[in-house]
Image (tube, helix red, strand yellow):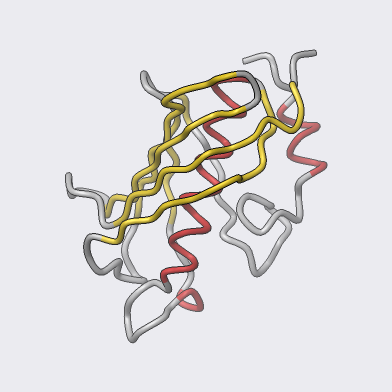
Amino acid sequence: MSLDMDRIRQEYDRCFGCGRSNPLGLQLDGFERTASGIAVSWAPRPEYQGFDGILHGGIVAAALDEAMAWSAMLTHDVFVFTGTLDFRYAAKAPVDAAYRIEAAVTERRGRRIRIESQLFVVGQDKPVATASGLFIVAEEMRP
């Protein structure tokens, strides 16, 4: 990986999705490269509840969006911004569950990148939510 992750982490430390110093944020961290993209484990906070015991759909959407952006960063060395998103919620997402999010770039044409992601309850093979989106390259990150 050619990115300066320490610099990126410092610059985006207050990010709602991945900032380590944002006490209200999702604090997604520990992104891993996989054969097809990236994966990250996540344990949501009780405050992210919508209906009783269920994660708020907007929080699920934010987590999937963040993972997709990191997928572009870690596999294509680019910062991206979200152009469009499409979400599918397949099952209830318990607020007290442990999750794994997977994301992968499916296509790149110039500055346009298509990315897909899935949210799984740890230990289950069917995703509780999926997302796909068109992202636009904001900056190439090669040193």
Quadrant position of residue 55: bottom left
Residue 15, x across and y down, in percent = 71, 54
On-image quarter of the N terminus: top right
- Residue 141 position (above or below residue 125): above
Number of numbered markers: 0
Q: Is residue 121 left or right of residue 136?
A: left
Report x, y in % for residue 67.
51, 43
Q: Is residue 109 above or below residue 26?
A: above
Q: Considering depth in this image, is 88 or 129 the residue closer to the camera?
A: 88
Q: Nearer the viewer, residue 143 or 41?
A: 143
- Residue extending farthest to the bottom is 52
Q: Is residue 75 left or right of residue 2?
A: left
Q: Give x and y (percent) for residue 100.
A: 36, 46
Q: Residue at x 51, y 36 (%)?
A: 31
Q: Answer left or right for 107 relative to 20.
A: left
Residue positioned 62% across, 28% down in the render: 73
Compared across the picture, whether 4 is left or right of 80 comes to: right
Q: Quadrant of the C terminus?
A: top right
Q: Position of residue 21 (x, y in %)?
A: 73, 57
The residue sitting at 75% across, 21% down in the picture is 141
Q: Is residue 33 above or below residue 61?
A: above
Please give the name of the residue rendered at 40% of the width and 38% of the height, measured from the top-left corner: 116
**Quarter of the image holding residue 98?**
bottom left
State the residue in front, 41 or 139. Answer: 139
